[in-house]
Image (cartoon, rainbow, N blue to C red):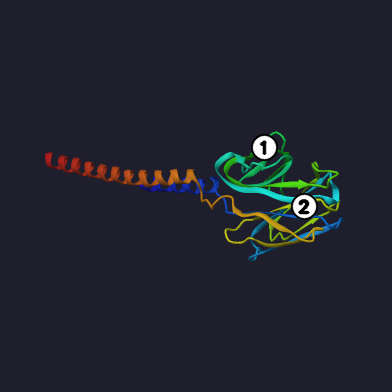
Amino acid sequence: MVVVVVVVELVLIWAANVTSMSATTNNIEIWTGTVSTIGTSTITGAFSGSVTSVETGLNAQEFSASSGSSTVWGKDTGGGISNASSTTATFPKLTPRGSGELYFGDAVEANTGSAGTTPGFTYALTDKANVVAYDTKVSSAVQPMAKQSPGSVSGGLAVLITVSGSSATPHPTVSAVDSLATKEGNDTTTLAVSPGHVGDLLVLAVEVFSPSIKASSVSGGGVSSWTRVEGPFTSYPTIGPGTLSDIIVALFLIVVPLAVIGLVVLLLVRRRRTRAASTAS
């Protein structure tokens, strides 16, 4: 009886470890650069440690302003967020100091991410089904949301970018150019892009699935100088098998001792009955 109980519990624990929530911690950074050379180019990221066996991601989006090559881009504010286990992946809430600002955020989900429905935002999926969200005309506090399935932990990093032009275009409008360029996988250090206009802004989200490694520099992509504008930020801590396993382990620790105690009591009762029967005969 005890052996059967132990075997069943061990099988359940193994199943829980396989199917329940787990995730490896990560660092997210956001870099920006103004395009100085158009045409096909390669963004190259350098890291503080070896990423040969570490999953990394480079996700870039180009933005253009109606003020053209005279556009001046700047950072307003930024921040990160860590979310508890849920099917909703919430981006950081940011409040602009002006109007017509660009919100750009990168959310990393432990499981498969998908686009949200926050009004005004455009969503794009990375190679590994993480989610990028941006809004090119933010004038009040915003906090977009994405989704993931099944539910698990998530987190993200975001920044608000200001834009200004010449006296002829004092309040330029911003629009996205083409789609998200994305590449993720072990030892990902380069990303092919093709910026179309001098003066455009390239925004790059760098993801490193390691608690200690971060991007040390970014170069290329038609940009003469890149700047880290936000991060690195750890969007969620490393988590183990999850709540399901914890519950089953607790059951294992309770059920097995009770079964042993029950078996001992049963044996003692049987022995007493056997002695009593022998004495009576």
In the rendered view, tell whether residue 16 sits above or below residue 34: above
In which image quadrant can residue 88 be found? top right
Q: Is residue 212 in view? A: yes
x 60%, y 58%: residue: 210
Q: Is residue 145 left or right of residue 8?
A: right
- Mark on residue 209? none
Q: Of 129 and 64, which appears nearest the observer?
A: 64
Q: Is residue 154 left or right of residue 100?
A: left
In which image quadrant can residue 175 be found? top right
Crowd class of label 2 (few under 14; some 14 to 19; many from 20; radius 10 Å): many
In the rendered view, tell whether residue 138 sits above or below residue 180: above
Q: Of 186 and 98, which appears nearest the observer?
A: 98
x 67%, y 57%: residue: 56
In the rendered view, tell whether residue 210 sits above or below residue 262: below
Crowd class of label 1 (few under 14; some 14 to 19; many from 20; radius 10 Å): few
Image coordinates of residue 68 in percent, x first then y, are 85, 48
Q: Is residue 1 in view? A: no
- Alpha carbon of mark 1 to alpha carbon of mark 2: how far? 23 Å
- Which residue is denoted by mark 1 in the rendering? 140
Q: Of 113 and 266, which appears nearest the observer?
A: 113
Please name which of the two marks, 1 or 2, marks the residue nearer to the observer: 1
Amino acid type of the residue tagged 2 in the rendering? Leu
| Mark 1 or mark 2, earlier in chain | 1
Q: Is residue 27 left or right of residue 69?
A: left
Asked which secondary structure carries label 1, the reply is loop
- Which residue is denoted by mark 2 in the rendering? 202
Amino acid type of the residue tagged 1 in the rendering? Ser
